[in-house]
Amino acid sequence: MTAVAHEEHDAHAGAAGHGGHGHVTNTGLSNEKLAMWAFLGSECLLFGALISTYFLYRGRSQVGPYPDDVFDIPYTSVSSFVLLMSSLTMVLALAAIQRGDERRLRVWLVATALLGASFIAGQVYEFTSFIREGLTLKTNLFGSSFFVLTGFHGVHVTLGIIMLLSLWTLSLRGKLGQEKSEVVEIAGLYWHFVDVVWIVIFTVIYLIPTPSGPGG
Amino acid sequence: MTDTLNPPVVAPAPPTTEPLLLKRPKNPTGVLSWLTTIDHKRIGILYGATSLIFFLLGGLEALLIRVQLAQPNGTIIPAGLYNELFTMHGTTMIFLVVMPLSAAFFNYMVPLQIGARDVAFPRLNAFSYWTFLFGGLFIYSSFLLGGAPNGGWFGYAPNTSVTFNPGHNIDFWIFGLQILGIASTVGAVNFVTTILNLRAPGMTLFRMPIFTWMSLVANFLLLFAMPIITIALFLLMFDRNFGSHFFDPSAGGNALLWQHLFWLFGHPEVYILILPAMGMVSEIIPTFARKPLFGYRVMVISGIAIGFMGWGVWVHHMFATGLGPVAISAFSLSTMFIAVPTGVKIFNWLGTLHGGSLRLTTPMLFAIGFIAMFTIGGLSGVTHAVSPHDRQQTDTYYVVAHFHYVLFGGSLFGIMGALYYWWPKVFGRFLNDKVGKWHFWTWFIGFNMTFGPMHLLGLQGMPRRVYRYDEGMGWDLWNMVSTIGSFVIAVSVLIFISNVVNSARRPVFASADPWDGRSLEWSIPSPTPHYNFAEVPIVHSEDDFWHRKYTEDASGRLVRIEGVEQPPAVVDKLPEHHEDPPGIHLPSPSYFPLVASFGLPVMAYGMVYGRDAGQNYVIAALGGLITLVGLFAWAMEPSVEPEDPEDAAANGHGDGHDGPPALVAATSDGEVVEDDGERIPRELLKGSTEEEGS
């Protein structure tokens, strides 16, 4: 009986790579990967709606603090760099499991999670310093749209960290072997997506100069 | 509903003594088997039964509205309750009736039509259903908890902000729709993956049945439209619960932001509601005209075109908001253009009917009724593209007439036809055709009596959403006619219910292929066996099953191929218990989809009442924890149990966290969906030569 289960299991692992049977009647991607792509497509609209809202309200706040009053662009640039570097370690994690190097897989998974966590820590620090300077969700349109957009992204990164740590735990328990490399690849898709979205958000919020003041 | 249809439901459930999060249900029976089912067919039936019950509730709300409006100065319903009724009527009919009824058919029919044994992610599919059910129950619980949503189905902010609507009515609406949105999004991911990846060998995209095609387009629309309303609702939640200013004009907020976000979701939503029904009608008409669908490829392409163009017309819901001539001209044009692919479809249906040997069965009557009524609704829609006219009709009963012709005359006619059409496949027994015709004609007459006059009322200036009107406005006659018509529809629904009950009590059993159908679902027994296809079919052409049955002789006449037997019908028993044929291992039942969705309403109640409790969101966090634990346990549970239950028990692997390593899935957070149900590879299935089950 276990032999049957085993056989099935192996067939699954195989199907992931070559898409199984008959090229014309499926996409050649595994179900899991295709579903992740579909989900990320949906996520684009989620962030798209939030980013549009931020754009609409740029420079429309009637009271301060305004963006120029609170932003510390060098600081946020560094934490953005940290997040982008986590995409590199994610790629290294995938490369490790594809070669069957489970030890390095764990190293890079933890490194990715730590880089992500540093980004989140940076965001928490940034939020608290903004709040100390008098900018909250309730202060003005800038506060509302800034905290909701970046917070929403922060929640995504946090979920990604939980995902990475779950993979790390699985690997520690010997349940994430080379044949499961696609699981890491799919988690990586999500992680890279969250990074790419940050590039857009960072550009929109921090790099494009915002007119200050009401009606500006 | 299901109870009367399907004896397995009423079978007594053995008490489950096992701890919930530990033991996997093994060969469950009775109610438990429905609670833990991950079979796409049972989930389809659950979706259908649940949404038909919501249909009765939404209908009841409509009747109350019509009773109030039957005469001038109606006194039966106070203004506040009236607001709740029209809000809940719209919300119910869209989110709890037409969308899930379409989902019922996606679930049941799409895997059968593409020759698959289940959807790509069976447990995720169960999660969608339970989430939908909890979302619906959550919204409806508001009637008992101080008042139902009352801001219209579109919930325009800032009218729905806490300043103008301080009660919990809107909170229930916000979180209820969020829950339903999760169900729809997850379902869309599942069906897109299923249709693109699980087609039987030879079933290329352009050999897919048209219903499957329209389902694919509708699910892509769901995938991209739902996140937009999710964000709109999020922003509104932040305004209401946490004091942000997104929809607060006094802080510079833009009142039109809500309308843009809502209608950018809302207009694709219209096509989400109609495309599946178009697909259903496109299946029914060729079957009963005994002709292939006229211009199959054009039909597919126009469906895709509608899917794309549906994103570029939302502003026609906002012509009266003063957006300026450029925006209005652009969206007028796009609104006129979208009538083109729709018109193409109508002519193709007519082309299919033309010269066919028509059999006017009940499904066919509903399909023809669909074409006629949808054409009227489509034409009144085009009049809205003429913006001066639209401006005149905005917020009048003309608009109400228009969208009921599209959603009732369109979607619901199509769905009713589909219920009669596929009923024999799902339950192995017919709905009575004679009673069905009574159903159709009362439905048709009642519908036109109710909504036809609303065109006139609207042109005479009667506004929507008013709970009473004065005498002497010239509206009395048509309002009375409309109310009488709504009761004719009610009678029609009673006829339908009696038909369903009788089909359960005095069944007329159906063969596997009662209509001489064209697509793969008719090639397997009725009701469908648990495993769908004993052998995975190999597809050679469009309408493959038809071509297995018929060929043409030298003079081009249709000839039945000798020696092709009807597939055996399983009429003596319903597929309650399923011993799979050797070699077929279907995914096993699971508790965790139910557990994971159960956390969502808990979270929602926590959010609603946390606002009162001094921003104390402990309950909401608890709900989130339940969902998270459910998802973790689910991810650690193998999709397919090893064959021998004792073997599994010996491994001690009922325990969610210590399952065997096989098929362990990836992740755990609420958003990632890649971790579900492995498919059974077809290589393994080829070994199976069993004819049928049990």
Image (cartoon, helix red, strand yellow):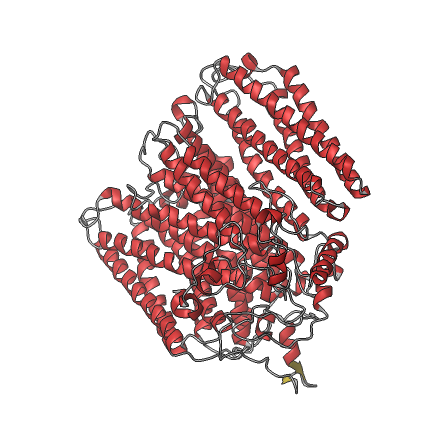
Q: Relative to B7, does residue B242 appear above or below in the rendering? A: above
Please state if B77 lies on the left or on the right of B426 as rendered.
Answer: left
Please state if B144 lies on the left or on the right of B588 as rendered.
Answer: left
The one nearer the camera, B584 or A174, is: A174
Q: Is residue B521 visible?
A: yes
The one nearer the camera, A123 or B445, is: A123
Q: Residue furthest front?
A: B650
Q: Residue at x 41, y 58 (%)?
A: B50
Residue B224 is situated, as x and y percent measured from the top left of the image, at: 56, 45
Residue B191 is situated, as x and y percent measured from the top left of the image, at: 58, 55
The one nearer the camera, B172 or B279, is: B172
Q: Quadrant of the N terminus of chain B?
A: bottom left
Please state if B167 lies on the left or on the right of B622 as rendered.
Answer: left
Q: Relative to A211, does residue B256 appear above or below in the rendering? A: below
Residue B71 is situated, as x and y percent measured from the top left of the image, at: 19, 53
Q: Residue at x 67, y 32 (%)?
A: A196
Q: Quadrant of the C terminus of chain B?
A: bottom right
Q: Relative to B278, does residue B634 appear above or below in the rendering? A: above
Q: Residue furthest bottom?
A: B562
Q: Residue at x 50, y 43 (%)?
A: B627
